[in-house]
Amino acid sequence: MKYIKILLLLCIVPIVLSGCSAAKTKTADIPGKDNGQKLVHDTVTIKASGSYEECIELRPGQVFDYEFDASDFVNFNIHYHAESGIQYPVNSQGVRFGKGAIDPGAHKFYTEEQENYCLMWDNLNDGTVKVSYKYVLRKK
């Protein structure tokens, strides 16, 4: 009986955990022609004085449009790691919303081998903050 309970736990726990993580971020192909566009959207809760980071893997020739709304003021940045250090194409302090587009080819220190841009929100408050965001990956 003891072994059956252990086996049951080993089978159920991974299923439950994978369901939790899979439900977090919503991703969808954008209908229409085969344009390679992908929409990602989510709402996250950031604990007091905490932060949340969403990293995007870009392929050569891709760009992304982004926007977000926060329930209270946050610091927001988009950054990538270059050989010369962390680069911040977007760095906004004390904002509740933001919108823009990122073209990696326009950034001085970016190389195709890096592939990752990260959107990051820092909660400036004593309570939780909800951030709803979305971005669209598209061909240049």
Image (tube, grey):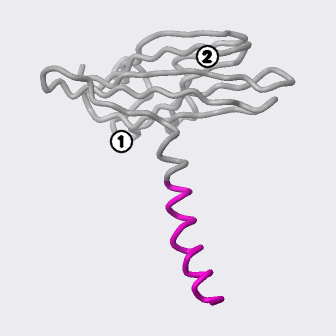
In the image: residue 99, left or right of residue 46: left
Q: Look at the picture and state if 84 lies above or below 68.
A: below
Task: Name the residue: 50% across, 39% down.
Answer: 83
Front-lying residue, 50 or 92: 50
| The disc label shown at residue 85, or none | none
Residue reaching furthest to the left? 33
Task: Name the residue: 46% across, 21% down.
Answer: 134
Q: Residues within 10 Å of mark 1 (few under 14, many from 20)?
A: few
Which stretch appears magenta?
1-18
Q: Amino acid at mark 1?
A: Glu
Q: Name the residue carrying label 1.
A: 113
Secondary structure at numbered mark 1: loop
Q: Name the residue carrying label 2.
A: 91
The CA distance from mark 1 to mark 2 is 23 Å
Q: Amino acid at mark 2?
A: Asn
Q: How many marks?
A: 2
Front-lying residue, 98 or 106: 98
Residue reaching furthest to the front? 1
In the image: residue 107, left or right of residue 127: left
Decide whether residue 133 is among the magenta residues: no
Decide whether residue 16 is among the magenta residues: yes
